[in-house]
Amino acid sequence: MLAAFSSTNWPSVDQLAILGAFSIPIVIIVGGLWYKIRKMVSENDLKRTMVERGMSVEEIERVLAAHTPDGKG
């Protein structure tokens, strides 16, 4: 059993370092994009719900401005 593991080509430390150096930024970028997409979908669902309830544009703008910390919707 151990002989099977000793004959495999394990990546060297240099290869693992390069893989880590490239994979970490990729994971950060994909995670950031995923977060933005989920936030946009959530906000669109909120807007759709408010429109279905019959809220006016001014009321929706007021809710969205109060919802975000900077007030920029």
Image: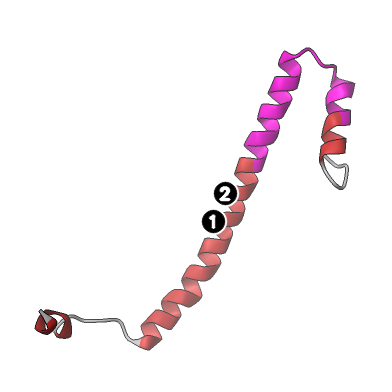
Residue 40 image offset from top left, x and y in percent:
66, 38
| Figure quadrant of the N terminus | bottom left
Q: Is residue 40 above or below residue 58?
A: below
In this picture, residue 50 sits left or right of residue 70: left
Q: Dominant secondary structure of the magenta stretch?
A: helix
Amino acid at pointer 1: Val
Quadrant in the rendering for residue 62? top right
Amino acid at pointer 2: Trp
Q: How is the image coloured?
A: secondary structure
Magenta residues, as a range? Answer: 39-62
**Image point (21%, 81%), residue name:** 9
Q: Is residue 54 above or below residue 17?
A: above
Residue matched to label 1: 30
The answer to if 4 sits in the magenta stretch is: no
Residue 67 image offset from top left, x and y in percent:
82, 38
Rendered image: mark on residue 34: 2
How far apart are the two marked residues, 2 and 1, measured between alpha carbons?
A: 6 Å
Residue 64 image offset from top left, x and y in percent:
82, 33
In this picture, residue 28 sits left or right of residue 57: left
Quadrant in the rendering for residue 13? bottom left
CB atoms at circles 2 and 1 under 8 Å apart?
yes
In the image, 18 versus 63, the foreground residue is 63
The answer to if 42 sits in the magenta stretch is: yes
In this picture, residue 26 sits left or right of residue 12: right
Number of other residues with Cα within 10 Å of mark 1, as a class: few under 14, some 14 to 19, many 20 or more: few
Quadrant in the rendering for residue 39? top right
Kind of element beneath mark 2: helix
Rendered image: mark on residue 46: none
Q: Is residue 63 above or below residue 48?
A: below
Kind of element beneath mark 1: helix
**Image point (68%, 30%), residue name:** 44
